[in-house]
Every structure is written in structure tokens, then in C-alpha cells.
Image (cartoon, grey):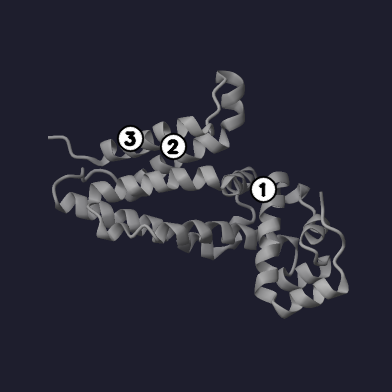
């Protein structure tokens, strides 16, 4: 159900707090784009659900495309901001790589919109994402984090030296995107709810185990 049209008082209040208004618009827009894709999303619905106006949305974000790119950027930013709170540089390499893998699993299971937005962009062959240099910078940060962890592990003689940071990023992404991105087909074909809470500790540990086992040196 959508909210009623914005009243003059509501619009005036929002104008007094533009950052809060923009954050609210991005929150609703993320859900709209994730559920309907770029073409199916409607700015009118976003305006209704945020008690703003289409004109105000375009004032802040320029266009529907600008709003969509901002939503994509915000999704990546939020992920990386949370990731930084792990302080993996202060952990032993094995613990750090496990923590990063398990955190990613937790994040994706609680942020379905992020996965759906990424899927939408892949369907669109990154038509819009490639217009955001900021996303490349954000993804470069996670590679740098993995590079630091793996370098320490190799120097301590506990990690293999023939695996690149991107390889681990790919493996973590594959294991953690799958439960969300494929949840419906898996449920239909295998009658397995990948998001069932009882399964989560098992799969969370499995993700950590598989990543740690992959990077560990075997003499």
C-alpha cells in the first residue's frame, strides 16, 4: 500500500532536512528498483511511498537514471561501510579470511535488495553501473583488504601463494550470492528453503570452512 500524497506541511518538513529526505528516497527507490528492475520501476510510486513529489526527486537526483545509479552506489557503500567495522587487519590471517566470508554470508542474507540490484545490472549488462566510477573504487577496496590478509598469510607460511585476492573474492561471492539469488529455483527443484533460519548456522560455517580450506597451505 502506498502512502497518501504529500501534504504541504510534510513537504516543508522534508525541505528542512534534505539529507534525511534523500536517504528516505534512496531507501524506497532501492526496493522499487530491486523488485521491478530499471524499466519496471516507477518514480511516481517512489514519490508516493516517501510522501515527496516526482519533481523533488528529480531535483535531488536529476533523473530516474540518476536515482537508480545513486541507489546502486548506496547499496555498495552500505556493504563496504559495514565490512570496515570488522577490523580484519587486527586478526590472524586465517581468522580474518573466515570472518570476511561469514560476514558476507550474513550481509547478503539480510540485504536481498543488494543481490537483486546486482542481478538487475547483470541482466542490463551493466548499462548503468559502468557510469559510476565510485563502484569500481568500492570494489577495489575489498580486493585491497583481501590482498593484505593473504599477504600476511603467505608471509607467515600458512597460506598458499598461488591464489589471487580476486579468486577469493569470486569464491566468497559465489557461495554467498547463491542462497539469495537462486532461492526460488532451489526451493522448487530441491524443496530446500535456502533462507530457512535453521539452515543458516550450517551454511555460514560451510562458507567459512570452504574459503579457509582453499587458502590454507598444504605441505
Q: Is residue 215 above or below residue 26?
A: above
In screen coordinates, is 20 left or right of 80? right
Q: Residue at x 59, y 24 (%)?
A: 187
Q: Residue at x 40, y 61 (%)?
A: 84
Q: For this rendering, which residue is in front, 95 or 56?
A: 95
Q: Is residue 38 above or below residue 57?
A: above
Q: Is residue 170 above or below residue 72?
A: above
Callout 1 crowding tier (Cα within 10 Å): few <14, some 14–19, many ≥20: many
Q: Residue at x 46, y 35 (%)?
A: 200
Image position, residue 28 (x, y; %): 70, 57
Q: Is residue 12 above or below residue 188?
A: below
Sequence-first disc among 2 and 1: 1
Residue designated by label 2: 175
Q: For this rendering, which residue is in front, 92 or 40?
A: 92
Question: What is the number of the mark on residue 34?
Answer: 1
In screen coordinates, is 98 left or right of 183? left
Using the rendered view, name the quadrant where residue 68 is placed: bottom right
Contact, CB < 8 Å: mark 2 with mark 3?
Answer: yes
Q: CA distance from mark 2 to mark 1?
A: 21 Å
Image position, residue 116 (x, y; %): 61, 44
Residue designated by label 3: 210
Q: Secondary structure at mark 3?
A: helix
Q: CA distance from mark 1 to mark 3?
A: 30 Å
Image position, residue 209 (x, y; %): 31, 36
Q: Residue at x 87, y 62 (%)?
A: 5
Sequence-first disc among 2 and 3: 2
Amino acid at each position: 500500500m502506498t502512502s497518501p500524497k504529500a501534504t504541504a506541511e510534510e513537504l516543508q518538513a522534508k525541505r528542512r532536512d534534505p539529507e534525511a529526505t534523500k536517504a528516505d528516497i534512496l531507501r524506497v527507490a532501492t526496493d522499487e528498483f530491486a523488485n521491478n528492475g530499471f524499466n519496471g520501476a516507477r518514480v511516481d510510486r517512489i514519490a508516493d511511498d516517501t510522501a515527496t513529489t516526482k519533481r523533488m526527486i528529480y531535483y535531488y537526483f536529476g533523473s530516474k537514471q540518476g536515482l537508480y545509479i545513486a541507489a546502486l552506489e548506496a547499496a555498495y557503500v552500505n556493504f563496504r561501510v559495514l565490512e570496515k567495522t570488522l577490523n580484519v587487519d587486527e586478526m590472524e590471517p586465517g581468522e580474518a579470511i573466515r570472518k570476511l566470508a561469514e560476514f558476507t554470508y550474513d550481509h547478503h542474507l539480510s540485504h536481498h535488495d543488494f543481490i537483486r540490484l546486482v542481478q538487475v545490472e547483470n541482466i542490463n549488462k551493466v548499462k548503468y553501473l559502468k557510469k559510476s566510477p565510485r563502484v569500481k573504487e568500492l570494489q577495489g577496496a575489498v580486493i585491497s583488504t583481501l590482498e593484505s590478509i593473504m599477504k600476511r598469510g603467505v608471509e607467515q607460511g600458512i597460506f598458499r601463494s598461488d591464489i589471487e585476492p580476486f579468486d577469493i573474492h569470486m569464491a566468497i561471492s559465489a557461495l554467498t550470492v547463491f542462497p539469495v539469488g537462486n532461492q526460488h529455483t532451489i526451493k522448487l527443484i530441491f524443496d530446500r528453503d535456502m533462507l530457512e533460519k535453521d539452515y543458516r548456522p550450517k551454511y555460514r560455517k560451510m562458507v567459512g570452512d570452504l574459503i579457509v580450506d582453499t587458502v590454507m597451505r598444504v605441505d
